[in-house]
Image: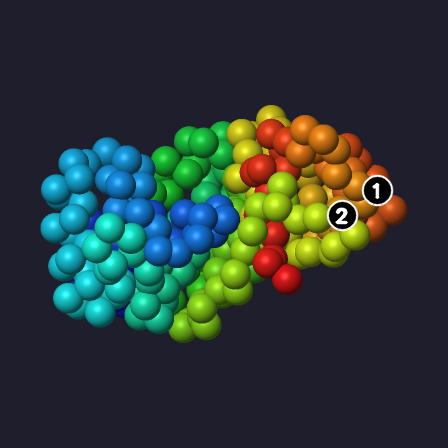
Amino acid sequence: MAQHAQHTSEAEEMYLITIARAVEDGRPEPVPVSHAARELDVSGVSANQMIRKLAGRGYVEYEPYQGVTLTESGRVVASSILRRRRLWGVFLSEQLGLTPERADEVACDLEHITPDDVADLLSGYLGDPASGPRGHSIPNGGSDPAPPPTVRLDAVPAGELRSVVSVNLPDELRRFVEMQGVVPGADVEVIGVGGAGDRLVSVGDTTSHFTVDLVSGIVVSAR
């Protein structure tokens, strides 16, 4: 069993990573409970019951009519689960040839039963990858500090340099921006902003024009 399995159920972990992924994608906290309900395909009543349970256990802070914020304990659990999911995603896609979508689907089952030491071994075997097969960053092992605040690239004005945190786009579009150098950890500078929200960006020696549907799926550091 995973190291934290005695403390959190699979259902609880799914709520925690759903909130963490929303923040990772640029949604500010508190995250509405309705967002978790929609993503997990459960009723609003069920979502509220689980959120209150998690709040009682110290994993989240719940503000009625506002939403949910992960506590430090909640972030540690969410980071651990997301680390396992994305490591398995890399293994399944690179070693077994599964598509990124299928790899992520299978990894969703493996993430809840993988011990910490096995996750560390898997990371070492894969060469300690920085991102999963769908472009999301892989958290470090251990009790990571709270992640830095993020924004979507479509909120960054011209003349600012930001670090890419994750790329949350359909696979074809993700591969396109990756070919332009936009990958987790890369520094991207916004050179110009168009009237429709499109942006001219520079990564290293590569300058590209990204439409609004592309920049809205690129999450970068807030500062």
- Res 80 seen here: no
Kindly identify the amino acid type of the residue bearing the numbered disc 1: Thr
Are the residues tagged 2 and 1 within 8 Å (C-beta)? no
Query: For the point 23% across and 34% down, which residue is it?
Result: 41
Query: For the point 56% across and 38% down, which residue is it?
Result: 217
- Between 101 and 115, the one nearer to me in the picture: 101
Q: Quadrant of the N terminus?
A: bottom left
Residue designated by label 1: 206
Query: For the point 68% across and 29% down, which residue is it?
Result: 196
- Between 63 and 121, the one nearer to me in the picture: 63
Outermost residue on the right side: it is: 205
- Res 190 seen here: yes
Query: For the point 35% across and 71% down, which residue is it?
Result: 72
- Between 148 and 17, the one nearer to me in the picture: 148
Which of the two discs, 2 and 1, sits closer to the camera? 2
For the residue labelled by badge 1, is the local secondary structure a helix, a strand or a loop? strand
Residue 204 percent location from the top left of the image: 83, 50
Residue 98 percent location from the top left of the image: 47, 32
For the residue labelled by badge 2, is the local secondary structure a helix, a strand or a loop? loop
Give the mark nearer the N terminus: 2 vs 1: 2
Q: Quadrant of the C terminus?
A: bottom right
Q: Which mark is residue 158?
A: 2
Residue 94 percent location from the top left of the image: 54, 40
- Between 94 and 195, the one nearer to me in the picture: 195
